[in-house]
């Protein structure tokens, strides 16, 4: 990890630097006005400049080729996925990347349940048939509706088994609501968090073997992030494990399925319907695919929830150094105490805390409260101190091998 010397913010009094210097945030996509209002009400400048902004808020804009100024401290993604952000580079450069897990969960859950019903009742076929009768006389419409309705016969979801793979914010909501619809639900997630486990109904069957979920479920719904380990998670080998005539729903990420394996499964009867929020040229050629144009989070409520949540998180980080819902730094927050706050990011290697606290002591500062958290190769420290803080202390921290950045706020 290359040490990045952040633009320094200095604070000598408890009324801190942000009472005198305005934060600048650049918006790369249209963000809900409620999120913008939150920032503006907290004296944040929404900047159009290409230099010297403190943070970025983004939805879908691709930032991999974007040149970031040295002043950049944070990137906030108003949504869950961060594939459009160069996360590894940001980690190396000491830029904290935030997302908004759960903010759009209800919107996606409702569309998943819609997909569930679309898969077992030929609603789309029936609608298209009915619309085709618009030029017929009234009596012919009624006669053809009655004579043709058997062509669109489906089946009920009640009593069937739904396998939910991935029990994050969306997966838990889908699992719980599916129980209320009368389905039997199996859940699989080897990395489920304690918070999500508390929210999951005890009636959901917790399954430790992914093959069991795949082979016993009538419906499979995928709710996992896209990573190197989940690339083409649903591949040909796993499709072969499915029950015949099963339904697969993917409202997570297009890359977690092997489209060729899906199409082969549709051809040989392993899969009766594939419902996806991610149309592609291959998939659109199959009449057994129900393609939805990436509408999972496309509700007014979800967009507002994401905008407000990301605005609050980024502002709290810039103002207080607190990290909540970061994808590359550890979650780390603490209520303020003392006259000054110092935040330090460093490589997760031995003796860093000792060196940091040694510098605090050498500068005759008293630590009121301190928290240290780590995540993979990165650690993060929040220190509230009493005493006069000199400008040189940040230079002392940054001179320590392994320190990524140090800020006084």
Image (tube, rainbow, N blue to C red):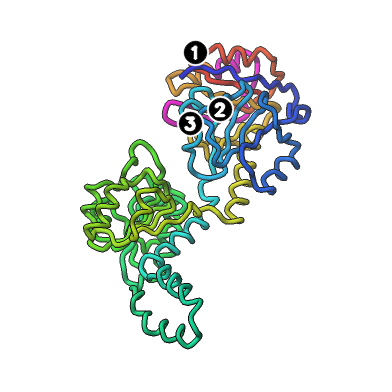
- Magenta span: 356-379
Q: Could you tell me if residue 409 is visible in this image?
A: no
- Which residue: 69% across, 14% down? 391
Which residue bears the numbered disc 1?
A: 401
Q: Is residue 13 left or right of residue 403?
A: right
Q: Secondary structure at mark 1?
A: loop
Give yes or no for contact between labels 3 and 1 (Cβ–Cβ under 8 Å). no
Q: Depth check: 278 or 306 in front?
A: 278
Q: Is residue 161 left or right of residue 316?
A: left
Q: Secondary structure at mark 3?
A: helix
Q: Could you tell me if residue 378 is visible in this image?
A: yes
Residue 177, image x, y percentages: 44, 64
Label at residue 87: 3
- Which residue: 40% across, 69% down? 125
Outermost right residue: 20
Which residue bears the numbered disc 2?
A: 66
Vertical arrangement, residue 121 with respect to residue 98, above or below: below
Q: CA distance from mark 3 to mark 1?
A: 23 Å
Give yes or no for contact between labels 2 and 3 (Cβ–Cβ under 8 Å). no
Q: Is residue 99 left or right of residue 408?
A: left
Residue 98, image x, y percentages: 54, 37
Residue 253, image x, y percentages: 41, 46
Residue 279, image x, y percentages: 42, 51
Q: CA distance from mark 2 to mark 3?
A: 13 Å
Label at residue 68: none
Vertical arrangement, residue 271 with respect to residue 370, above or below: below
Residue 197 is one of the magenta-drawn residues:
no
Label 3: how many Cα within 10 Å (few below 14, some 14–19, many 20+): some
In this view, the mark in front (2 or 3):
2
């Amino acid at each position: 990890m290359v040490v990045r010397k952040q633009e320094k913010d200095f604070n000598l009094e408890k009324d801190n630097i942000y009472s005198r210097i305005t934060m600048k945030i650049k918006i790369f996509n249209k963000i809900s006005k409620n999120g913008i209002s939150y920032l503006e009400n907290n004296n944040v400048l929404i900047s159009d400049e290409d230099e010297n902004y403190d943070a970025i808020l983004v939805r879908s804009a691709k930032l991999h080729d974007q040149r970031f100024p040295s002043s950049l401290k944070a990137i906030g993604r108003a949504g869950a996925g961060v594939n459009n952000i160069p996360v590894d580079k940001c980690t190396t450069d000491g830029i904290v990347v935030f997302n908004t897990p759960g903010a759009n969960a209800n919107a996606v859950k409702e569309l998943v349940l819609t997909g569930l019903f679309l898969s077992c009742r030929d609603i789309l076929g029936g609608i298209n048939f009915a619309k085709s009768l618009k030029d017929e006389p009234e009596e012919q419409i009624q006669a053809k509706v009655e004579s043709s309705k058997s062509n669109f016969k489906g089946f009920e979801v009640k009593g069937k088994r739904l396998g939910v793979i991935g029990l994050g914010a969306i997966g838990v909501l889908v699992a719980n609501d599916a129980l209320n619809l009368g389905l039997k639900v199996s859940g699989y997630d080897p990395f489920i968090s304690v918070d999500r486990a508390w929210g999951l109904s005890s009636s959901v069957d917790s399954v430790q073997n992914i093959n069991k979920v795949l082979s016993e479920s009538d419906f499979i719904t995928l709710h996992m992030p896209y990573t190197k380990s989940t690339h083409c998670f649903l591949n040909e080998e796993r499709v072969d494990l499915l029950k015949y005539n099963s339904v697969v729903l993917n409202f997570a990420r297009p890359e977690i399925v092997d489209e060729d394996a899906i199409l082969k499964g549709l051809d040989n009867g392993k899969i009766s319907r594939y419902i996806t929020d991610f149309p592609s040229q291959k998939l659109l050629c199959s009449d057994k695919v129900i393609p939805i144009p990436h509408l999972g989070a496309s509700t007014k409520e979800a967009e507002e929830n994401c905008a407000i949540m990301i605005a609050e998180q980024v502002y709290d980080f810039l103002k207080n150094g607190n990290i909540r819902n970061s994808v590359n730094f550890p979650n780390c927050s603490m209520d303020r105490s003392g006259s000054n706050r110092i935040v330090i990011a460093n490589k997760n290697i031995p003796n860093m805390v000792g060196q940091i606290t040694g510098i605090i002591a050498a500068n005759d500062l008293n630590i009121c409260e301190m928290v240290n958290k780590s995540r993979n190769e990165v650690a993060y420290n929040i220190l509230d101190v009493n005493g006069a803080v000199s400008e040189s202390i940040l230079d002392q921290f940054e001179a320590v091998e392994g320190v990524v950045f140090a800020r006084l706020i």
